[in-house]
Image: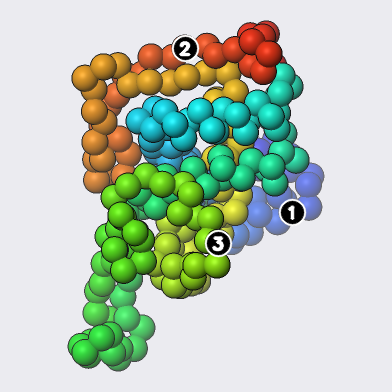
Amino acid sequence: MDSLVDAEPDTPTLTRLSTGADRAQLHDDVTSLLIGGSHTSAPAGAWTLILLARHPAVRRRLHDEVDRTVGDRPVRATDLPALDLTGRVVRESLRLYPPIWLFPRHTTGETELGSHRFPQGAQFFYSPYALHRDPRWYRAPDTFDPDRWILDGRPAPPNGAYLPFAAGVHGCPDGDFALAELTLLTAAVSRRWHLDPVPGSRPRPVAAATLGPSPVTMTVTRRPGPGGVFPGPGS
Ligand code: HEM
């Protein structure tokens, strides 16, 4: 960002930012975007591909959807509405393995929560990982089941039961973007490749700053596109 500001000194916005007090803010915003946008999507994408490898029947259906929708051309943003199952797979993967698994909050005033009273400034942690596996809202909560998101008249989980992007003023500003990005990524990879953990390797969640999988070696196999054609390089 410093290079951008230095390289474009005549741009009014950048001039203001590079000379004014906003520079620190700009630095913080860019850092938040870079870290917030990559350290979350990466484990989410990894878990999605691992879950697909563990559930071949879902993966076959996803391949059908991707082949039908995308065919032999590259995936496009305009494919999103037709990538219905792919979107549900991503949503379900974020339910089971929310990249940010623990949120800190503190009370800004005296607060009542359940039957407890807390003073201003009390520190809380809450976990979407735990919320997402609550059997009150999710049947067989530990099971990977993208079809649970087809509601068919059943009530959706209540507000607060699905929080991969947190909520409120500090919630993720780019949740919709992330869902779209992950759906397109899953479709683009699945269109051309099978990814399977090598036999005997069972990636498990590692609860660090984000909830990534433990190191896993995947075998990558090229898959034929619709009609048995192998897409060429760059497609
Ligand atoms: C699967 C992908 C993602 C997940 C699970 C995710 C999740 C979250 C969560 C839970 C927070 C709030 C943290 C808290 O309340 O303490 C957050 C904040 C944020 N996210 Fe995301 N995020 C994702 C992708 C992205 C992407 C792609 C971008 C940008 C392109 C992004 C930008 C941000 C920023 C800038 C914040 C800070 C907002 C603030 O403090 O006001 N995130 N994200």
Query: Which one is earlier in the sequence, the residue at label 1 or at label 3?
Result: 1
Q: How far across and how far down the image is residue 113, in percent? A: 28, 85
**The disc label shown at residue 13, or none:** 1
Q: Foreground: 61 or 110?
A: 61
Q: Residue visible at 55% across and 14% down?
A: 223
Q: Which residue is mark 3?
A: 152
Query: Which one is earlier in the sequence, the residue at label 2 or at label 3?
Result: 3
Amino acid at the residue labelled 1: Thr
Q: Foreground: 109 or 62?
A: 62
Residue 67 visible somewhere in the drawing: yes
Would you place residue 163 above or below residue 41 in this image?
below
Q: Residue visible at 46% across and 58% down?
A: 165
Q: Residue visible at 78% across and 47% down?
A: 11
- The quadrant holding residue 71 is top right
Q: Which residue is mark 2?
A: 221
> Secondary structure beneath disc 3?
loop
Query: Which one is earlier in the sequence, the residue at label 1 or at label 2?
Result: 1
Number of numbered discs on residues: 3
Q: How far across and how far down the image is residue 117, in percent? A: 22, 90
Residue 42 visible somewhere in the drawing: no
Residue at the outermost front position: 152
The residues bearing labels 1 and 3 have C-alpha atoms spaced at a distance of: 49 Å
Indicate which label's residue lies in the foreground, 1 or 3.
Answer: 3
* Beta carbon of the mark 3 residue lies under 8 A of ligand 1: no
> Secondary structure beneath disc 1?
helix
Q: Mark 2 Cα within 10 Å, few/some/many (few <14, many 20+)?
A: few
Q: Mark 1 Cα within 10 Å, few/some/many (few <14, many 20+)?
A: few
Q: Residue visible at 45% across and 72% down?
A: 159
> Secondary structure beneath disc 2?
strand
Amino acid at the residue labelled 2: Thr
Amino acid at the residue labelled 3: Asp
Q: How far across and how far down the image is residue 93, in percent? A: 42, 45
